[in-house]
Amino acid sequence: MRSALRLMFGLWAVCVSLTGCVTVAPLQTPSQRPEVTIAGVTKKEVIDVLVTEMVASGAQVRQTNDYTAVFSKRDTSLGGALVYGSKYDSFPEMRLTFNFVDTSGGIRVFCNAAMITNPGSAFERVNDVTGGKTAHEMQGMLERLKTALQR
């Protein structure tokens, strides 16, 4: 009976994960990854607005400097636990890393996302999730950041 339940649960988990594998068009950015160039601002202004917005959304600041800002937030969803959870820690952590580069056109901001299994432990595993639907969501967030700063 237990093995039949495990098999059914396993099949269900595979079906759920496959439904998330919908093909999404690549981003129309120079790197085909989430990025924007914001004219007329300093890195500090970009970082200040980004920190304010991320903290307001419930994320924690892990690191900031002139070139990088890293934020994390626990993913307590069932899907996150099924795909990225472990026996050590059921709930993974979503980690967003923003990189800032001075260019002649302004500050170029790149964003990467990772799901972290067993965050903060010796068994930490990083899974890059900067692609597909997540990339489009992050690009939208960067576009909103750009709009807010160029008013």
Image: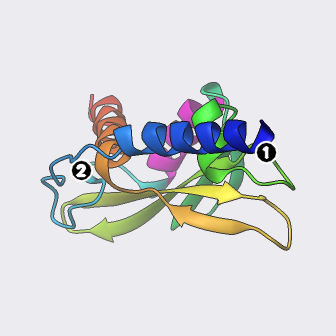
- Single out the mark in the foreground, 1 or 2: 1
> Amino acid type of disc 1?
Ser
Instruction: Look at the magenta stretch and give its main secondary structure.
Output: helix
The answer to which image quadrant residue 74 occupies is top right
The alpha-carbon separation of the residues under discs 1 and 2 comes to: 42 Å
N-term mark: 1 or 2: 2
Counting other residues with Cα less than 10 Å from the Cα at mark 1, is it few (<14), some (14-19), or many (20 or more)?
Answer: some
Residue 95 visible in image: yes
Question: Helix, strand or loop at disc 1?
Answer: loop
Q: Is residue 111 above or below residue 140?
A: below
Whole-percent x, y for residue 129 in the image: 45, 56
Residue at 37 percent of width and 68 percent of height: 101
The answer to which image quadrant residue 99 occupies is bottom left
Whole-percent x, y for residue 98 in the image: 48, 57
Whole-percent x, y for residue 56 in the image: 62, 26
The answer to which image quadrant residue 30 occupies is bottom left
> Amino acid type of disc 2?
Ala
The answer to which of 26 and 88 lies nearer the viewer is 88
The residue at the far front in this view is 1
Residue at 59 percent of width and 49 percent of height: 83
Q: Is residue 48 magenta?
A: yes
Residue 73 visible in image: no
Label 1 sits on residue: 90
Looking at the rendered image, the quarter that the N terminus falls into is top right
The answer to which of 138 and 37 lies nearer the viewer is 138
Whole-percent x, y for residue 134 in the image: 38, 44
Residue at 50 percent of width and 37 percent of height: 49
Q: Is residue 115 above or below residue 150?
A: below
Disc assigned to residue 39 = 2
Q: Which stretch did the figure color magenta?
A: 44-55
